[in-house]
Image (cartoon, rainbow, N blue to C red):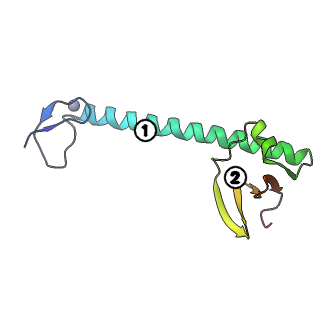
């Protein structure tokens, strides 16, 4: 059965699991995928880093509890976090690296200063 190279579309024959016509096409394909993956990771890391700066700035200013809208106004991105856990009734704890915060239903954010909290 004739198949076509994933990279250049050229027809080729060979093993059933072969996807590329030649090594150059396989290398180019893998490099391109790595570039796309690295680009996504850089974007996520950029958001996490910006979020972390907002949280640490607020902590340094002594703001442990504040309206979520204030964080949003500083471009805090609530969609991106390193992990989250349901730990207390009616809420969830989110982590941005070593900093944790809780968002209440009423729209206030409490930033936690200790990992154990
Ligand atoms: Zn090819």
Residue 115 versus residue 7 in the image, above or below: below
The Cα–Cα distance between marks 1 and 2, rounded to whole angstroms, is 24 Å
Tell whether 17 sits left or right of 26: left
Tell whether 113 sits left or right of 93: right
Q: Residue at x 50, y 38 (%)?
A: 38
Q: Which mark is residue 34?
A: 1
Q: Which residue is mark 2?
A: 97
Tell whether 107 sits left or right of 32: right
How many numbered callouts? 2
Disc 2 beta carbon < 8 A from ligand 1?
no
Tell whether 52 sits left or right of 80: right
Task: From the top left corner, tell me how far across and down residue 98 is, in percent.
Answer: 73, 55
Residue 75 versus residue 87 in the image, above or below: above
Task: From the top left corner, tell me how far across and down residue 46 is, in percent.
Answer: 64, 37
Packing grade of label 2 (10 A; few <14, some 14-19, many >=20) is few
Q: Residue at x 7, y 43 (%)?
A: 1
Task: From the top left corner, tell me how far across and down residue 39 is, in percent.
Answer: 51, 35
* Nearest to the observer: residue 15 or residue 43: 43
């Amino acid at each position: 059965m004739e198949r076509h190279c994933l990279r250049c579309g050229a027809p080729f024959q060979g093993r059933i699991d072969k996807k590329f016509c030649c090594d150059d096409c396989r290398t180019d394909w893998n490099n391109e995928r790595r570039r796309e993956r690295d680009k996504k990771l850089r974007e996520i890391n950029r958001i996490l880093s910006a979020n972390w700066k907002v949280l640490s700035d607020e902590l340094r200013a002594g703001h442990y509890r504040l309206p979520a809208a204030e964080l949003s106004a500083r471009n805090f991105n609530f969609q991106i976090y390193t992990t989250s856990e349901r730990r207390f009734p009616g809420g969830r704890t989110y982590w941005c690296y070593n900093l944790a915060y809780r968002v209440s239903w009423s729209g206030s954010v409490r930033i936690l200063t200790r990992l154990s909290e």
